[in-house]
Image: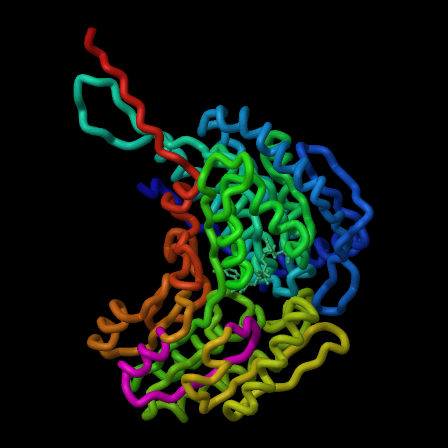
Amino acid sequence: MLKGFKNAAELDFTLEENKQKMEEAFRQVDAEKGAVYPLIIGGERIQTEDRITSISPADKGVLGYACTCSREMAEKAIVTANEAFKTWSMVPAEERIRCLKKLAMLIDENRFILDAWNVEESGKNWGEADGELCEQLDFINSYAMHMAELDKGLELVDTDEFNKCVYIPIGVGVALPPWNFPFSLFGNMVVSAVVTGNTIVCKPSSDTPIVAYKFVELCEKAGVPAGVVNYIPGRGSEIGDYLVEHPLTRFLNFTGSKAVGCRINEHAAKISDGQKWIKRVVAEMGGKNAIIVDSSANVKKAAQGIVNSAFTFQGQKCSACSRAIVMEDVYDELVDAVVECAKALKEDQGSGRSNAAMGPVINQGAYDSITNYIEIGRKEGTVVYGGNYSDEKGYFIEPTVIRDIKRDARIANEEIFGPVLAVIKVSSFDEALDIANQTEYGLTGSVYSEDRDNIRKAKIGFHVGNLYFNRKSTAAVVLQHPFGGFNMSGTDAKTGTSDYLTNFLNLKSISEDLTD
Ligand code: NAP
């Protein structure tokens, strides 16, 4: 079924040639800094007076200005996408897949400049940015493959009638992505809509509108017709409800916080005047991911896995580990090993552009919230590593390890979305599982254990969308670890799969009586 699908390979930045190409790409970014990015509606570039300033989280320098979409422009975008749907939904799947294949080629050709913009705008390092680009290529290639299969329709029982059951597109979608994977999560929302024959109105995150713009430009170059993908940056708090409640909106594809996701779900459920359908909502939300370490675990390996999961990209991956739940007999050893591993990261903190292991957090709001949690954590436990921060130049926070956290502590239950690890001591594996499952979330989880009974127990009892054993909780790979969360972590959409695409398709059963 996977028909030769192969995951894209990340660039090796230890090679001089790749380093030089990256430096060249940063020079190009510098030359483009300060540009104004218009809305793109039906292929038309529209400038507006009100603008969102895109800021580098590493030095607070201005990267560019995204024109901000008003309600009038949001209306125009949805009506335009609705018009485009009338023709795009009739275009054969083969043609839509061709556009995706071309898009993949263009992404590959523009790889370094896309990575460089991502580094500048999101604050991630080169490897993280290129990993994201690979994920996007994987999404494209997997959806192209899945759509070709889905296009055959369902296999039905043979009778005297002429029967078929086919997948058809559903309408206009609204894409509401987060800033932390500005290329692949934004791109995923776009290509899943395009390949299924739908049209999409994209409101990028206000923190990362430039990366999104670059992606939309490539869609145009790949031959996606005007109006199929529309780009309307704007503050979610200002135009979000309008887009969600619009009667022509057929589906919402959201990834972000629990609070916003729940709001979207609620508003999408209300039927607006003239609305003819129940809207579909894909909402992938937050997490409070745990890694359990039992007495049989390889402690050094577990510590490295915890540190990688908790602190890479500054703990701003939805899959990041923010709780280590550790059996008492290996607790002290594990905490010491975690601190040792974290030291290497702290010593390599700097800008994403300098390709440091750890960079800045995304913005002032995130910085204030995370550092507030560090102060809460100081009262709830003992900071054994890190705990310092500064927003003088950029938004920098040390990898912070807080031990002796009780299960009902705030930092053991609330999503922090930054480089802060709460370490919790338990006396049994059952207690560890109970604590792991106690939050309202259920996104990722990991267990370090050599004990088959515990592994079996966790496979059944650890309630998360993505469960790992003896490996970190981050770095899900398309079609290796289909991604999507349980409970308040989301609708379990499992990106990259054929199931994911069916969120944006209807099945139409058609029967013709052949008798006279
Ligand atoms: P966010 O604040 O919820 O924003 C996500 C998107 O929703 C942004 O485009 C935002 O626009 C928009 N938005 C805000 N208010 C809205 C409204 N009322 N109606 C419609 N859209 C609205 O989340 P974030 O800070 O960007 O991302 C971090 C969160 O995402 C974390 O909780 C993380 O766990 C989660 N996340 C989850 C996954 C997953 O797969 N489960 C993956 C990545 C991230 P503005 O930028 O203009 O506010």
What x and y, as percent, mark residue 245?
57, 45
- Report the front residue among 487 and 475: 487
Residue at image coords 41%, 57%: 484
- Work out whether residue 253 can be spotted: yes
What x and y, as percent, mark residue 358?
60, 73
Vertical comparison of 235 with 47: above or below: below
Q: Describe residue 309's horizontal placement relative to residue 69 as left or right.
A: left
Q: Which quadrant does the C terminus fall into?
A: top left
- Work out whether residue 113 can be spotted: no
Q: Which quadrant does the N terminus fall into?
A: top left
Q: Quadrant of ligand 1?
A: bottom right
Vertical comparison of 250 with 483: above or below: above
Q: Residue 436 colored magenta?
A: yes
What x and y, as percent, mark residue 281?
47, 48
Q: Residue 232 colored magenta?
A: no
Residue range (magenta):
415-437
Vertical comparison of 155 with 39: above or below: above
What x and y, as percent, mark residue 130?
57, 57
Furthest residue in direction front, as rendered: 273
Vertical comparison of 165 with 202: above or below: above
Residue at image coords 62%, 64%: 124
Task: Give the image's coloring scheme.
Answer: rainbow
Figure quadrant of residue 488: bottom left
Residue at image coords 41%, 46%: 500
- Report the front residue among 435 and 133: 435
